[in-house]
Amino acid sequence: MKNKTLRSTQKLLVLNSKNLTVHPDARTAFMVWQQHRSPLRRPQLAGLDDYYRPALRLCMLDRDSYQFFNNFARIDEVMRFEDSWRQPCLIALESRHDIKRLAWCEVLSLSRFAGVNHPALFQAIYKNASKQLICELMGVPRLTVSNYCHFAGISQSSYEYQQCKVACDETLLGLPKNMNWMNGRHG
């Protein structure tokens, strides 16, 4: 897409679950983001004039359907609190590589929030994302716990403490890892 002329379109759209879906290249990152995000509430923007709300970057799927690939927290707010309000949107063709980069940037930004379970977040990133892409975004040569801790701004001992604390808490609960007992199956 380097030599193509790309035209962006600005629109005011009322977004809902019928006309907005996650882009397939951002789906895994969005699922990881949903599992590890903090339940922080941001100021509500529903009362603002349409033009003052932050623009959402979307891809057009067809005439009346769109896909999102970044700004997950804002999309979450729109879908939960502002589904009847018009939203300023920038509709543009995006490369698959850029979509993946922007989606995983959203996940990596979670490492900066207080209360994040860093070992679980690191494992989710390690298992689900392209190592090369994450290393590029973090500016590190290899995806290691040490490099993650440096990127997240935490000490490795804090990471290890959190890892041990979660393991101890799971042991104290005493629930079996196999949860088939909830369905009435035993064994």
Image (cartoon, helix red, strand yellow):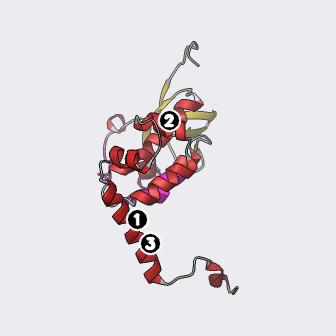
Badge 1: how crowded within 10 Å, few (<14), some, or many (20+)?
some
Q: Is residue 14 left or right of residue 49?
A: right
Say which residue appears at 61% left-offset and 37% top-offset: 64
Q: Position of residue 17 (x, y in %)?
A: 56, 51
| Kind of residue sitting beneath label 3 | Ala
Residue identifier under label 1: 163
Residue 163 or 176: which is nearer the viewer?
163
Does label 2 or label 1 sit earlier along the sequence? 2
Question: Magenta: predominant secondary structure element?
Answer: loop
Q: Quadrant of the C terminus?
A: bottom right
Q: Is residue 79 left or right of residue 25?
A: left
Callout 2: SS: helix
Can residue 70 be seen here? The reply is: no
Q: Position of residue 116 (x, y in %)?
A: 37, 59
Please count the marks in the image: 3
Q: Position of residue 167 (x, y in %)?
A: 44, 72
| Kind of residue sitting beneath label 2 | Arg
Say which residue appears at 34% left-offset and 65% top-offset: 161
Residue identifier under label 3: 167
Residue 118 or 164: which is nearer the viewer?
164
Residue identifier under label 2: 101
Can residue 37 be seen here? The reply is: yes
- Within the magenta stretch, is there residue 41? yes
Q: Is residue 91 above or below residue 107?
A: above
